[in-house]
Image: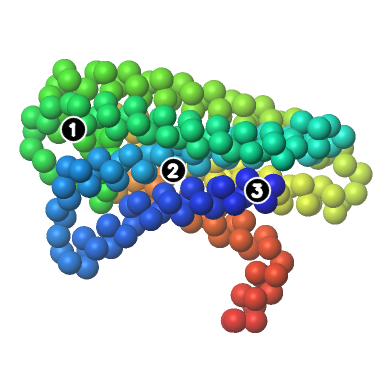
Amino acid sequence: MFFFLLNLALSDLGSICTTVPKAMHSSLWDTRNISDTGCAAQLFFFLFFTGADFSLLTIMCYDRYMSICKPLHYRTLLGSRACAHMAAAAWASGFLFSLLHTANTFSLPLCHGNALGQFFCEIPQILKLSCAKSYLRELGFLAVSVSLVFGCFVFIVFSYVQIFRAVLRIPSEQGRHKAFSTCLPHLAVVSLFLSTGSFANLKPPSMSSPSLDLTLSVLYSVVPPALNLLIYSLRNQELKAAVWRLM
């Protein structure tokens, strides 16, 4: 669990560092300029860390399923080598996902100016600047990505149904509380990340407005990574004790 948490923390930190420092710089210096290369790099790293983040959340769901539903097989199926392979697959899938989307998005001709109505470079805002017929290919990529994400979500939901059935059969109240306290924060973060990210990227143009777009972008790009770091850090007893001493 701690090995996957380390990878999740790295992806969350990378995701926040891709968008927030640039947004703070733009706010403090009252400038919204960003070069084409900088915009492409920001989009690439944001998609890379976000894709890896969701893959790691899916793997962590499988890790919880094995530890709660099949504890006797846990060390056999999830040894150190298997964990390393799964983490490497998560980072590789994030890289491939990011590379395909970034290359495809920035190959589109921009016919409607160069002003993004957002605090960072994201695909829906770039597609608004593209020609009417040129972004169909990117929409195809988005459809494939949504299908993969939906498949992972179905896997997560199915796994948690099995987990909750197993937890409710635990005789001790302390054991049930420990299992629920491990699973519910993870499920809450996954739900927030998926719901806001899907709505931000798939909502119809008629529902688009600057304030709504900004709110949704913050909710799926900044809040889930920050919540992950906060939730899983505060589960550490030594860290909680240090926070209380500091307060």
**Any part of residue 199 in sight:** no
Q: Amino acid at mark 3?
A: Phe
Q: Is residue 17 above or below residue 152?
A: below
Q: Which residue is mark 2?
A: 49
The mark that comes first in sequence, 2 or 3, is: 3
Task: Report helix, strand or loop for mark 3.
Answer: helix
What is the distance, in whole Å, between disc 1 and disc 3 at their CAs? 40 Å
- Mark 2 element type: helix
Q: Which residue is mark 3?
A: 3
Point out residue 121 in the picture as x, y percentages from the top left corner: 26, 43
| Alpha carbon distance from label 2 to label 3 | 17 Å
Three-letter code for the amino acid on which mark 1 is drawn: Lys
Percent position of residue 13, x then y: 46, 54
Classify 10 Å Cα crowding around label 2: few (below 14), some (14-19), many (20 and above): many
Q: Nearer the viewer, residue 232 or 9?
A: 9
Residue at the image point whose x is 75% and y is 37% from the top: 79
Q: Is residue 107 left or right of residue 99?
A: left
Q: Earlier in the sequence, mark 1 or mark 3?
A: 3
Residue identified by numbered label 1: 128
Residues at marks 2 and 1 touching, judged by CB atoms closer than 8 Å: no
> Residue at horizontal 91%, vertical 44%?
171
Is residue 137 in view?
A: yes
The number of discs equals 3
| Identity, as a three-letter code, of the amino acid under mark 2 | Phe
Q: Quadrant of the C terminus?
A: bottom right
Measured Cα–Cα span from mark 2 to mark 1:
24 Å
Disc number for residue 158: none
